[in-house]
Image (cartoon, grey):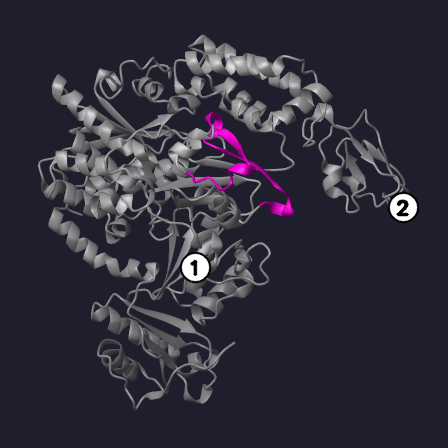
Amino acid sequence: MPRLTIDDLKKLRDQRAGAIALRAGSARARVTIHMGTCGIAAGAREVMAALLKAIEDQGVTDVVVTTSGCAGLCSREPMATVEVRAQAPVKYVNLTPERIVQVFQRHVLGGEVVTDAALAAGCETTG
Amino acid sequence: MACRSHVLVCAGTGCVSCGSFELGTAIEAEIARRDLAGEVQVVRTGCQGFCAEGPVLIVQPDEVFYCGMKASDVPTLVEEHLLKGRPVRKLMYTPPAAPAPVPTLSQIPFFAKQKLVVLRNRGLIDPERIEDYIARDGYAALAKALGEMTPEQILTEIKLSGLRGRGGGGFPAGIKWATCRQAAIHRGVEPIVVCNADEGDPGAFMDRSIIESDPHAVIEGMVIGARAIGAKQGFVYIRHEYPIARERLTKALEQAREYGLLGRGILGTRFDFDISVVQGAGAFVCGESTALMASLEGKVGEPRAKYIHTVEYGYKNLPTNLNNVETWANVPLIIHRGAAWFTSMGTGDVSENPWNGSSGTKVFSLVGKVNNTGLIEVPMGITLREIIFDIGGGIPRGRAFKAVQTGGPSGGCLPASHLDMPVDFDSLTAAGSMMGSGGMIVMDDQTCMVDVARYFIAFLTEESCGKCIPCREGLRCSLDVLTRISEGKGEAGDIELLEEMGGVMQDACLCALGSSAPNPVISTLRYFREEYDAHVRDHRCPAGVCKALIHYEIDQAKCDGCHACVTACSTGAITGQVKYPHLLNQDLCIKCGACIDACKREAVLRA
């Protein structure tokens, strides 16, 4: 690594800030991939890999991807829940690597719900 | 591919000694086995503070806190949480008296009440990767200091922040820096900056943890200080008992040099500065500034009288500015975020004069009879009660709080009536204790205050360098008297003798080790005099600690002959047949108390 100047230092900071922001918990949206046995069997891991690659390719640093258990609707897996900050979560069903990238583009980045892939808005009541 | 999840495994000394290195390796192996290697990253961080529950780890971005982890828990953790996204409840933390485990950091009172400034990167970055520090705005303050500020502007900012020395004295850093700079200019010589990492107070580990979790913060602070003062050379004096801290610091210095943040032409400017690490041999007195500088020069670590200050004539007679680890670590944030932000935390109004209050936060190591032992950072002005009962989770086994010792061996013990006192430099001093470097030892009703005073005086007697007579002889004499009292051989006049000797030492000792050495005795006498009286007059130790004044008995009516005490006793002092009341032979008993702990029927009595 060459010796840094003040400008190099700023560039390096911007490059690296994303990975750390994930640890510090500051994100504009969270995508939860449902990883129950059913989801994994239906291809949830491939769906997640495609999503992670899309995030990386576009240099997005403030979107969190996390996993969760089976959402209960095993026949429509792989499923994902998209939560954009301050908006109701939306569940997507029958995902493929291509469709999750679409959802990422249009919903997470564009703010428009991809209705033909969406199951419903909102979350189940718990408690 | 960017990782979607990070497992932050604590690699502070506390957790390392509970096996956190092995734990991290086991998690990595399991992640690889599950084919998650590109998605989940294991990061080894500095101390996360909750040492009582080690080894601990945090899974981000879910913010789930796990504690007391064993290698056998790893497959469950990886499969359930990291693969399937189901946090594992049985591995989470359950606060004392809480009905169920709580999953996230923000729900755990231990973390929720803290204010992380100096420790902002703890548990978040890998201390061995400079890129992690830079990503969290590391060295941005240095860029600002070199690119946009003159040395005078840096000095003004530090002065306005009201930053006071975190090593014990509480001397305003801005005044110290300015005096050192003036002295160097006046004499036409190059000044020196030194970081004091010779942390020696029993039960204190703040500085070790700061270096272990964020070494670059200390380095950045020193470079900024050097720029303000005009120094080209700096030292970190670190004790040899801190191997992990020293290793991480050395690695961090190498990385900083490689990146052009140390050495010639820092950040492409014309400013040169470098830092060497010097190992101390573990003498307590070398934490004292003049003794430390003598040791740096390769001489015997003995203090000298300070009518000439070290900021004028210090290391090799050059103007030398010495600050402790935590003070240096505060500097980058003050420059980066401004003095006004810093003074928004703390007590008093420091805008005119830094002596008028305590701004910022303070790191404490919270130890002793408290549920959540560990490393905490709190805003100045928080009460002792909040620290001990909210963050610390109260006293174990529901026992009563008796006293808290602050400031290390030179500090004092404060009783329950002071629990609502704000914790800042001046309030603690007024109460007869001191801030010190931030050790905080909590004591319950089974602690004998005479024994506590004796312990600290014994420690200081060992550590006194012996150069001046009031310290060398005063301590030895105090220890003799205290030992006599705790053996039940105290006489009328002993307490007065202790008080008189304390006064002489406060007035006549050469350095702060000696002049503050009577504090443990004086403060316990001030708040717990009746306990001394009980020892001297009635030959009784109310807390049941001083061995010469207590004996154990077995209550024949309560003993059911379970034999548990017989197994626990290491000297064979207890005899008896199973199912028949046992007997204790006083001649063989060494009063270790193992039988009391073993007995389930409270049949062993201490009198």
Q: Residue at x 38, y 22 (%)?
A: B286
* Residue located beneath label 1 in the image: B106
Q: Up-down: is B593 above or below B293?
A: below
For residue B579, which numbered disc appears in the image? 2
Chain letter for mark 2, please.
B
The correct choice, above or below, for B341 with respect to B542 in the image is below
Pick the residue in front: A62 or B495.
B495
- For the N terminus of chain B, the quadrant is bottom left
Confirm whether the magenta stretch covers residue A57. Answer: no
| Marks 1 and 2, the one that precedes in the sequence | 1
Q: Looking at the image, which residue is at 72% across and 23% down?
A: B548
B585 left or right of A26 in image: right
The reply, left or right, for residue B250 in relation to residue B576 is left
**Chain for disc number 1:** B
Left or right: B328 as drawn, with respect to B425: left
Picture disc at residue A19: none
User: Can you give x and y, in whole percent of width and height, for residue B531 in the image?
Assistant: 64, 27
Which range of residues does the magenta coloring cover? B395-423
Q: Are marks 1 and 2 on the same chain?
A: yes
Residue B271 vertical placement versus B478 (above, below): below
Amino acid, disc 2: Lys
Give the residue drawn at x 52%, y 13%. Answer: B501
Seen in the picture, residue B84 relative to A12 is either above or below; the reply is below
Q: Position of residue B145 (x, y in %)?
A: 15, 41
Q: Which of the 4 image quadrants contains residue B377?
A: top left
Q: Residue furthest top?
A: B469
Q: Secondary structure at mark 1?
A: helix
Asked if the residues shown at circle 1 and circle 2 are in contact, with their CB atoms under 8 angstroms apart, the answer is no
Residue in the image at 46% along x and 78% along y? A36
Question: Hey, what amino acid is under mark 1?
Answer: Ser
Q: Secondary structure at mark 2?
A: loop
